[in-house]
Image (cartoon, helix red, strand yellow):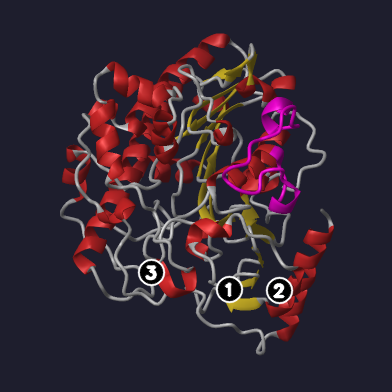
Amino acid sequence: MQPNILFIFPDQLRWDWIEPLTDLAVRTPNVRSLADRGTVFSNAWTPSPICAPARACMAMGTNYDRSPVRHNNHNMPAGSDTVYRRLAEAGYAVSTVGKLDLLKGFMDWGPDGQHRVNGDCRLHDLGFTRGLDNAGKHDALWARFKGVREPYMDHLASRGLDQIHIEDFKRRNDANLKVPVGETMKGGLEIPSAYGNTDLSPLPEDAYCDNWIGRNGVDELNALLAEGRPWFLTVNFAGPHEPLDVTASMRESVKDRQFPMPGRHDGLHTDLHQTVRQNYAAMVELIDGWVGRYVEILERAGALENTIIVFASDHGEMLGDHNLWAKSVPFEASVRVPLVMAGPGFEPSAAPVAAPVSLLDVMTTFLNYGACSTEGMDGYSLRPTLERGEAPERGLVFSGLGNWRAVGDGRFKLVAGFDGSLHTQQIQFAILDPAMLDAAKLYDLDNDPLEETDISEAEPAVRQRLLTALAADLEAV
């Protein structure tokens, strides 16, 4: 029997801010409960550390250089052979709620989130049989400024809350300073307003974006359970993506917690860093609460024992490490993501799986359990790991964006093309110069987790092995 699949997908969540992968003062008991019933992977990479490219790679099951979406302004092409389409063709009801981010460049969500154009529905064209796509935090405001209707802003407008939300977000607009990454890493700059503005959100609790998405997830889950056929649902939370806006109750829940400072930062703004980290924790914990709600619904419906539940994120968050914010860079805080999987027939793992895996493997695993073809996928099914504790099949993981590429084996990591000359928003639009492969840098993550020391001269054989693999991946395009 084909299992149901619930894919809970927050945006911009660091791998090391969930239980059981952290000793920080962040509480995610529902994610931990999933891990206790299944497997947590401590070395999962995104194929690309920015929203649209990461999600497009996953939708197509391909590495970054084989994906049609190379930056956030690209859209998924019509008629794409997506994982969602394959599941639908295998008999699944395939649905999405929240920020899908595969069609954002069109800016045509519409009030029902269907991306309707001339009678056609772009959401269905991706393979979804139902659902609702809303814009991300920043794009929702851009849509309003351009006169484009979008589900979340329409919801706020219906309650007379849209204008106060817009005015609040205008003060939180900058996720990064327009300063080259290399200069930013030296420190001495202000914290960007999307993080540094720690004022409370003016919205009531039930209008806060992730609570609205969470409720949509509840409604869609109940509707799918009533359909009486296998279903796939992805719930795409907007948080903990910046701006780090939190409600009064969210702030209250974390205000007395203490967090360590970012890794390799300039030592400035320590009090503000503390509040920023409290807000980030509050956003993570709110999403964890919705995880628990979905599990309760499945239990009451008698569907939990036939439902695969996966918790992951599209990419990480620098959160001040190296004096950087958001994503787009090849550091582990940006490319490494949380990954927890639980489901029928899964053998609970005694410890986190440290072998490298990719989000692409998750998508191939979905196809495997759905009795779908995995032809053309760059991922490997994790089913042997989940059911029998076998080592994951892949030995290397790949990630890339704009002008840089990275490959890792779990301990050693090779980075090519990243030179710090561009500011963060420019990286995604740059193009890799193949000559930069010769200048690739090698890091030992076991002994240098912040990736500060190039060990290429000390480990020439390792460097050559990873460089050869990276070159082969590029040549396979």
Where residue 46 is drawn, which disc sits there? none
Whether residue 293 appears in this view of the structure is yes
At horizontal 54% and vertical 83% (from top left) the residue drawn is 453
Counting residues from the N terminus, which is met first, the one under dot 2 or under dot 3?
Answer: 3
Q: Which amino acid, by three-letter code, is at mark 2? A: Met
Residue 340: x, y in percent?
Answer: 51, 45
**In terms of secondary structure, where does tag 1 sit?**
loop
Question: Which residue is the site of mark 2?
Answer: 436
Q: CA distance from mark 2 to mark 3?
A: 25 Å
Dominant secondary-structure state across the stretch colored magenta: loop
Question: Which residue is the site of mark 1?
Answer: 419
Residue 75 painted magenta:
yes
Q: Which amino acid, by three-letter code, is at mark 1? A: Asp
Q: Quadrant of the N terminus?
A: top right
Q: Residues within 10 Å of mark 3 (few under 14, many from 20)?
A: many
Where residue 323 is drawn, which disc sits there? 3
**Up/down of 84 relative to 458, above or below:** above
- Tell me the magenta residue range: 60-86
Whether residue 39 appears in this view of the structure is no
Q: Which amino acid, by three-letter code, is at mark 3? A: Asn
Q: CA distance from mark 3 to mark 1?
A: 16 Å
Counting residues from the N terminus, which is met first, the one under dot 2 or under dot 1?
Answer: 1
